[in-house]
Amino acid sequence: MIKLKNLILEYVAGGGIEVRPMKQDEIGFWKLFYSQHYLSQNSDSGIKYKFLILYNGTPIGIIGYGNVSGVGVIPSLNSMAGENLFNTSNVVELRRLFIKDDVNVHNAESQAISAGNIEISKLIPELQLIITFADPKAGHKGTIYKATNAIYTGSAGSGKHRFIYFAGNRRSDEGKRTLQFLDRIKKPYSS
């Protein structure tokens, strides 16, 4: 059995990647980067927390978090947990990640996710889980999520692969119960 403490995401500063909340006058970067990758979708589709990804001070991408998109996700998590452990105030979804194609930084996506998850945890002290999905219909396997030690929990009802990051306090009662829950639900992943 894998001990969850080995799966808890810890970010070691380095590599020149920085993630920080966007300032109001930087929203243009969001629209610019978003339009380069998500052409057919609304640029704010449920994204409540917008972060700028910088490399050595230069904007290279965006990462966005928001409310969990599926109405059944939180009830499903609570059902699996056997208790009402999760709600909209302690679970968010990593909804968008984009880094420009011409950025040549080793593991830039992994560094950005790690730093972004730490930043969102600072903004939401009660946060327990960050959930994200990889859509195989779009050719996404979740490789970056696996590389950042996300816990694979199987396919969601939509057919997307579901990954979860622990974001809580390991020492709190709620954090301990969340870790026990994650240890029970993780599944082996094969792409």
Image (cartoon, rainbow, N blue to C red):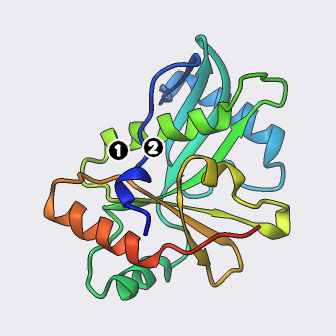
Which residue corresponds to the image point at 27% horizontal and 75% vertical from the top-left?
85
Kindly tell me whether residue 44 is visible in this rendering: no
Pick whichever, 46 or 94, lies toward us. Answer: 94
Give the amino acid type for the residue marked by disc 1 in the picture: Ser
Q: Which mark is residue 121?
A: 1
Could one spot residue 6 in this view of the protein? yes
Dot 2 and dot 1 residues touching (CB under 8 Å):
yes
Residue 75 % position (x, y): 40, 84
Task: Tell me the residue at 52%/19% (across/down).
Answer: 14
Which image quarter: residue 188?
Answer: bottom right
Could you say where residue 48 lies in the image, as x and y percent from the top left?
A: 48, 49
- Left/right placement of residue 83 relative to residue 113 reads left
Above or below — where is 175 with respect to 112?
A: below
In the picture provided, is 64 more to the left or to the right than 136? left
Pick the front one: 126 or 67: 126
Depicted 84 relative to depicted 183: above or below:
below
Left/right of residue 73 with respect to residue 126 in the rendered view:
right
Observer-nearest residue: 156 or 46? 156
Q: Quadrant of the N terminus?
A: bottom left
- Residue 104 in the image: x percent, y percent? 78, 22
Circle 2 packing at 10 Å, graded few (<14), some (14-19), many (20+), is: many
What residue is at 48 percent from the left and 34 percent from the top?
115
Which quarter of the rendering shows the C terminus? Answer: bottom right
Is 49 on the left-hand or right-hand side of 147? left
State the image coordinates of residue 167 (x, y, percent, origin top left).
36, 52
Numbered label attached to residue 117: 2
Q: Amino acid at mark 2?
A: Asn
